[in-house]
Amino acid sequence: MAQTADITEYTPADGSITMFSTSWCGYCRRLKTQLAADGIGFTEINIEETPGTADLVEAINNGNQTVPTVIFPDGSNATNPSAKEVKARLGL
């Protein structure tokens, strides 16, 4: 059984986010494009390639592997947030 990743391992620096995604997720591509256009830094983690992260996303989302799942610098998270929500939660 794979070990679930620890959310603190993926908590980003102030002013940026960690985004859990997959290569085929259209919502992930849209959010990445919008964040890049707004100059918001992010670290992308593909849950199909990084051991333990699919389980972490499931734990955050009540058993569902829903992406994009975003982790904020304060340790909070959001599932499929808009770029506007990301900016607001980062205080930008």
Image (cartoon, rainbow, N blue to C red):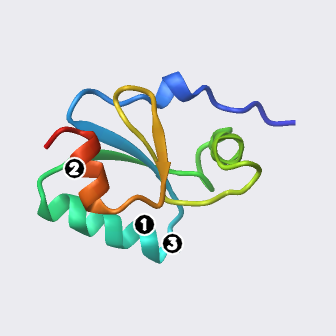
Q: Is residue 74 above or below residue 59?
A: above
Q: Earlier in the sequence, mark 3 or mark 2?
A: 3
- On residue 25, the disc is 3
Q: Which residue is mark 1?
A: 28
Q: Is residue 56 left or right of residue 91?
A: right
Q: Position of residue 61 (x, y in %)?
A: 66, 49
Residue 41 visible in the picture? no
Residue 63 visible in the picture? yes
Amino acid tagged 2: Lys
- On residue 87, the disc is 2
Q: Secondary structure at mark 3?
A: loop
At x 72%, y 56%, the residue is 64
At x 34%, y 63%, the residue is 82
Amino acid tagged 3: Cys
At x 22%, y 59%, the residue is 35
Q: Are marks 3 and 1 in contact (CB under 8 Å)?
A: yes
